[in-house]
Amino acid sequence: MGDEKLKGMDDHELLVELVKSQRKDALGQRITAFATLGIFVAVAIALCIIVPKVTSTIDQVQATITETQTLVADTQSTISNIDTMVSDVDSLVVENTESVGKAMESINGIDFDTLNQGIEDLAAAVEPLAKFAEMFK
């Protein structure tokens, strides 16, 4: 239908239609160019806002990772020290158990009847000395 319309036109009318078509195309191209420029500006502004924040976040993540690695190393050292301390406490308990066992054997070896008799004899021997000392008071 468009081709039949163009066939019936003379040269002047065809040129007028061509100019109208070119103006429409030029307007579309301008709108597209401005829209593209607007999108470019929006993306550039977004990048200017986002990139520093992303960089800051990455730096914070890196610092956190470094601190975490330090804490893990410290924790491993502490666990090693705790293992050593538990081993030392274990050997101390074993040594003290042996010492307590020997002390209990010595205490069990005491003849308390003889000890009580010795204390009574000493009290009987000291009693006259105590009476004698009272006279000088």
Image (spheres, rainbow, N blue to C red):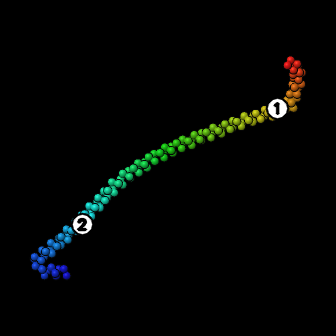
Q: Residue at x 81, y 32 (%)?
A: 109
Percent from the top left, x then y, of residue 50? 36, 55
Q: Is residue 24 above or below residue 102?
A: below
Quadrant assignment for the N terminus: bottom left
Pick the residue in front: 1 or 37: 37
Residue under numbered circle 1: 110
- Number of callouts in the render? 2
Q: Are marks 2 and 1 in contact (CB under 8 Å)?
A: no
Residue 79: % across, % down: 57, 43
Residue 18 horizontal side relative to residue 119, left or right = left
Locate the C terminus and report the quarter of the image it occupies: top right
Kind of residue at disc 2: Ile
Amino acid, disc 1: Ile
Indicate left or right for 70 with 13 as reference.
Answer: right
Q: Residue at x 35, y 53 (%)?
A: 51
Above or below 110: residue 1? below
Packing grade of label 1 (10 A; few <14, some 14-19, many >=20) is few
The crowd level at tag 2 (other Cα within 10 Å; few <14, some 14-19, many 20+) is few
Question: Secondary structure under badge 2?
Answer: helix
Q: Is residue 96 above or below residue 58?
A: above
Label 2 or label 1, whichever lies nearer to me, is 2
Pointer 2: what residue?
A: 31
Q: Residue at x 25, y 63 (%)?
A: 34
Where is residue 72 drawn, in percent x and y? 51, 45
